[in-house]
Image (cartoon, coloured by chain):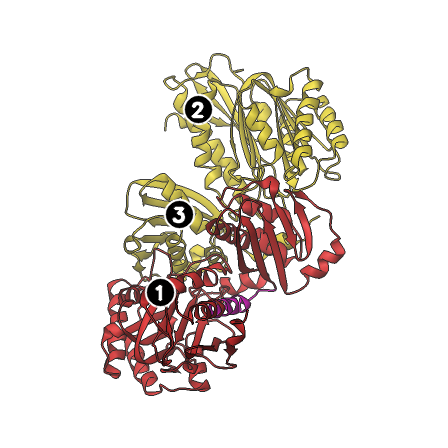
Chain colours: A yellow, B red
Amino acid sequence: MEKKSKWIKLKNRGVTAVNGFKSSGISSGLKKGKKDLAVIYSEHDAQAAGVFTRNLVQAAPVHLCKSHLENPIRLLVVNSGNANACTGEEGMQNTVEMAEQAAAGLNLEARQVMVSSTGVIGEQLPMEKINNGINKALAGLNRGPGADIAAAEAILTTDTKIKQVAYRCSTLDGDFHLAGIAKGSGMICPNMATMLAFLVTDVRIERELLQKLFNEAVNSSFNVITVDGETSTNDTALILANGAAEGVEITAEGHGFDSFKGLLNLVCRELGCSIVEDGEGLTKVITLTIKGAADQESARILSRSVLNSPLVKTAFYGEDANWGRIVVALGYAGVDLDPDRLDIFIGPYQVAANGGSVPFSEAEMKKILQKRDVSILIDLKQGFAELTAWGTDMSHQYITINSDYRS
Amino acid sequence: MEKKSKWIKLKNRGVTAVNGFKSSGISSGLKKGKKDLAVIYSEHDAQAAGVFTRNLVQAAPVHLCKSHLENPIRLLVVNSGNANACTGEEGMQNTVEMAEQAAAGLNLEARQVMVSSTGVIGEQLPMEKINNGINKALAGLNRGPGADIAAAEAILTTDTKIKQVAYRCSTLDGDFHLAGIAKGSGMICPNMATMLAFLVTDVRIERELLQKLFNEAVNSSFNVITVDGETSTNDTALILANGAAEGVEITAEGHGFDSFKGLLNLVCRELGCSIVEDGEGLTKVITLTIKGAADQESARILSRSVLNSPLVKTAFYGEDANWGRIVVALGYAGVDLDPDRLDIFIGPYQVAANGGSVPFSEAEMKKILQKRDVSILIDLKQGFAELTAWGTDMSHQYITINSDYRS
């Protein structure tokens, strides 16, 4: 707890609050009149760690990022409006060209550039617009709140708000920073269900340790949010650590380890929750805690099954404490559990004990379910693993948004 | 093909078109004013085979049916309105009591009775109503179109129509019959997403062979339909074979084997499709064929992933040939495939070749997508397995129906 007090949130700030990073966001013409191309530049070589979509169908830039992970990274280029997915050999060449074009503008090598794309699937990138856009964006690299927002804006698709967070943290060795931007709203336009997150920090850290800590943080944040259970071809979470905070080195035994790890978890969770909160069409944010699970993986599978169940989601939309649907979703998740031991709480009220119903006041429950934030607690009484995950209800608006014709 | 011509569909007939079976359906008071209790009686001991929900949470009657499978079955009792699921020890006792009550009325043993329930989860059965209802139903056992319909009606929950089918088949050894009833509409009221199917036949057949053939038939019918991906606590498909068709014995090498097997597949498929067709709120029935799969199981998993994807379902509701969403759903299904070899057709038009887009006429495609029946063909080009599955779109009406408060 004492460590938590050392984290200072930097209001209205994003990636350039971190030492040695500049950013920019411009309109390249992919999305008429809107910002659609972001760059984040590091003045020093940065260690990179990444977590990528598990979808077998992976967009060209995902392949590029994976192959560049062990390189000294200096630049991240992100376009929105076109996912460069299902685009074959030409798509791969276009991603490489983006890296080359950006590298040339800053006298870097293409291997020092990460590329990310989000938008429509199956269409080739308009490379002339992209290349001109990259030059324009590089020319605009800057620091400060304006540069933060420009980058955060340019990666959005149908999001209704920018998602950025920045923290400063004091350690015995000095201050460091961690910041990030994200995009994704799940209930979104055709072909744009991608989740992207880009974090930057100025600590010095070995790549392997960074990857390990990032995996853990992503697992309990971006990987436990779900809006509709879809996994995109482009999902990407990247972190760059450039060591620009003099003297702050994170090692497994060092002073700053707990602070960095804790803050990394916090930032990932804040960005993840901001994606859920921005789900278009949602009327409820559901916080689901599964306790007493045999292990984390079981808890994760169960949480996804419950939060992705159309019948659970529509029940909450209807403000109905329909715990039977929760039990059904647990039962078909494919995880071993004892239905006769299940305890379920909705808000503060127990609705099931040992798999059977518990009487509750419908009037009191109605008050709980009318709120925007609803919590569910499920105790499996099997083991000691616990997990909290976030989801949404499913509304008429979800259908409206997602049945709109491609545009 | 010559065998097919020997199958004669018996219009407007159901289970009592089969020799040695009587049925009845009455109102016991569980569902006010509606039929809610069905019985199907066999004059001879019948071999039984069953396929049950894979949900770990299984209703009490599912447990009873499983334990009675190897017994000589004479009677099937089904109530709608209450699923007797998540009802613990008392629920199990109530199911046993239903079997005992029914057996007593006909001088049978409880072990000769199958019980099935569908409806609300988590509430105990009102046993006085149930027991009186069983007596009333047994008193009404009869043959003929009226008795067929009464039983088919009494098992429904929110279905909008009865689902029954009956066939006579000629073989060298004589005629036999196969008939069945089903209930389920998927897009349905809270807690009532159960699929039930009850088939009867008058052939003589060993239990093991019957179970084997029934497994195969269910796998390519009830197990490849999906409306919302939910698997209920009560899903049950049962077949009873009472041997009343003199001289017709089905053995693995006998004359009638192909006829029986083919007809069993046909009846299961017809009943399965009638469930999809009755999906409340659907505007499209999607027939998905996956070919070139490595094996049947891969094809099955992929078909479910595509047909359960909210983004695919809403795209078809929006009459949008959004093949990118199909690729995404294939990619996250957890089955090994090569995205760069995928061919996809919607109706007669190819929309993707080797994982990339193929130009098509939006105007022509619109004509295809405006129809109620839409077909998708996916060629994985991996192997030789092929599977056809059925699903629906997801409409505003789906949300409306499923967000209604429990009633």
Q: Percent x, y for residue A162?
A: 61, 37
User: Which-is-in-front pick, marks 2 and 1?
Assistant: 1
- Kindly indicate the quadrant of the structure image that contains residue B254: bottom left
Label 3: few (<14), some (14–19) or many (≥20) C-alpha neighbours in 10 Å: many
> Which residue type carries mark 1?
Leu
Give the magenta-colored segment's residue range.
B267-283
> Which residue type carries mark 3?
Leu
In the drawing, does residue B368 fall left or right of residue B113? right
Per the model, the C-alpha gap separating discs 1 and 3 is 36 Å
Q: Say which residue label 3 marks.
A: A302
User: Which-is-in-front pick, marks 3 and 2?
Assistant: 3
The answer to whether residue A153 is magenta is no
In the drawing, does residue B39 fall left or right of residue A211? left
- Kindly indicate the quadrant of the structure image that contains residue B43: bottom left
Q: Secondary structure at mark 2?
A: helix
Parent chain of label 1: B
In the drawing, does residue A68 fall left or right of residue A369? right
| Above or below, comparing residue B372 to residue B202 in the picture | above
Say if labels 1 and 3 share a chain. no
| Res. A260 mark | 2
Work out which residue is located at the far top of the displayed protein and give it. Answer: A247
Q: Say which residue label 1 marks.
A: B209
| Above or below, comparing residue A224 to residue B149 in the picture | above
> Which residue type carries mark 2?
Phe
Q: Percent x, y for residue B308?
A: 52, 54
Q: Percent x, y for residue A398?
A: 58, 53
- Main SS type for the magenta part? helix
Q: Are marks 1 and 3 in contact (CB under 8 Å)?
A: no
Viewer-closest of B211 and B39: B211
Per the model, the C-alpha gap separating discs 3 and 2 is 30 Å
